[in-house]
Image (cartoon, rainbow, N blue to C red):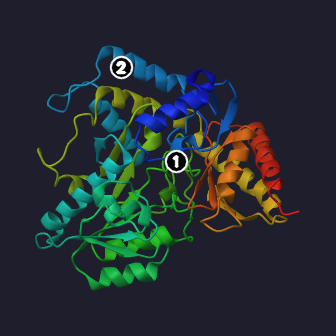
Amino acid sequence: MSVAEKTLAQQAIALEEKYGAHNYHPLPVVLSKGEGVYVWDVEGKKYYDFLSAYSAVNQGHCHPKIVGAMVRQAQQLTLTSRAFHNDMLGTFEQYVAQTFGYDKLLPMNTGAEAVETALKICRKWGYEEKGVPANQAKIVVCENNFHGRTTTIVSFSNDPVAQTNFGPFTEGFIKIAYDNLSALEEVLASDPHITGFLVEPIQGEAGVYVPSEGYLAGAKALCEQYNVLFIADEVQTGIARTGKLLATCGNCNCSDRHCSGTPEVKPDMLILGKAISGGAYPISGVLANDHIMKVIKPGNHGSTFGGNPVAAAVGLAALEVVKEESLAQNAAELGDLFRAEIQKYVDHSQIVNGVRGKGLLNAILINDTEESDTAWNICLALRDNGLLAKPTHGNIIRFAPPLVMNKEQMLECVSIITKTLAAFEPV
């Protein structure tokens, strides 16, 4: 087939295949436009987005307030580096710190960068505040975690695809079972050199595993008992995705505009990314109080783009949208609706084993092996029917639409999903 005979989508995919590294396996659809809960491909076909760029686009595609803030700031000042102050950074830091109840924010660009930042702070705190001997600090992590793909982070992954042929790996990490307080207590009691416990409040990449009630609070209590920092990676779960501003908010009486309740657990360090930008610009950060953040001194850590004026303007607007449009409440209500409607299908299905999640971070488990292509083929059929989603771990399909979705749209999407699944049921 000549270049002229290929569709626009085929041409775009062929260019990526030829000139791009093959480090992703995208669904074969080429998108060129987004607005709210919808995206359009290069041929003009419209889809519901049920991935939200892995929860980066919680506020919807191309939100006018966020895009407007980005454009205005880009026309004024884009980058100074941190060699100089800029007039946006302090305002952004204050807003984020006060929104989440911390003394300080250390801004970065990507989720993985923010995780690496938290690890460095945790280790330095361990040496300078806890008194751990030099180069002996250890950090506890959970099996089946996903915190990014840098060399240090994949060092404590148990995903062979992430680890194979990337060693030697960074030492100083101890893996334990997720959602297991006994395992955490055992390891904390056994080693006084442990300085931190890094955990996802919900394991997203692992298949949207929601821990048992009380797990996070219990883990925080154990960390306090053994003088260990509780580090919450809310890159994917934060910014209203799970029906609260943070997944660690638990069952507090939280509204979008003001939280008057007590969080289930207050992390010693909070890692944010993805939707803190509304999907418009790379922004991430680590929040902590002064007694932790004070260990970072000039020259210890930094980033040319971290805390740049455009990021600050975009981040402010993105967080304001979450509050102004009550997106946490909407996520909670639509998430309950989604799981209830899908459960009706699951109850008589042979192809779907279950539905789980919190807020608008959900997944269905396909009744097949991880090595099968059933979930992938279902996602291809969903695409053909106007809805975009992606499998994880082979036989799990994650559903995470933008939080600006309304009830009517959600019910239409449930109909698309169930009708698509029905075509895969055994005859």
**Image quarter in which the C terminus is found:** bottom right
Instruction: Residue type at mark 1: give it.
Output: His
Q: Position of residue 316 (x, y in %)?
A: 41, 32
Q: Position of residue 159 (x, y in %)?
A: 44, 66
Q: Is residue 65 above or below residue 157?
A: above
Crowding at dot 2, Cα within 10 Å, few <14 / some 14-19 / many 20+, comes out as some
Task: Name the residue: 16% across, 73% down.
Answer: 136
Which residue appears farthest toward the top when viewing the image? 75
For this view, does 141 lie left or right of residue 279?
left
**Secondary structure beneath disc 1?**
loop
Which residue appears farthest toward the right when viewing the image? 427
Q: Nearer the viewer, residue 215 or 338?
A: 338
Mark toward the start of the polypeptide (2 vs 1) = 1
For this view, does 307 lie left or right of residue 81?
right
**Image quarter in which the N terminus is found:** top right
Residue 337 appears in the figure: yes
Q: Position of residue 406 (x, y in %)?
A: 71, 37
Which label is found at residue 25?
1
Which label is found at residue 73?
2
Q: CA distance from mark 2 to mark 1?
A: 35 Å
Q: Is residue 193 above or below residue 63?
A: below
Q: How many marks?
A: 2
| Closer mark to the observer between disc 2 and disc 1 | 1
Q: Quadrant of residue 329?
A: top right
Q: Nearer the viewer, residue 362 or 30?
A: 30
Instruction: Residue type at mark 2: give it.
Output: Gln
Q: Nearer the viewer, residue 117 or 164?
A: 164
For this view, does 224 lie left or right of residue 182?
left
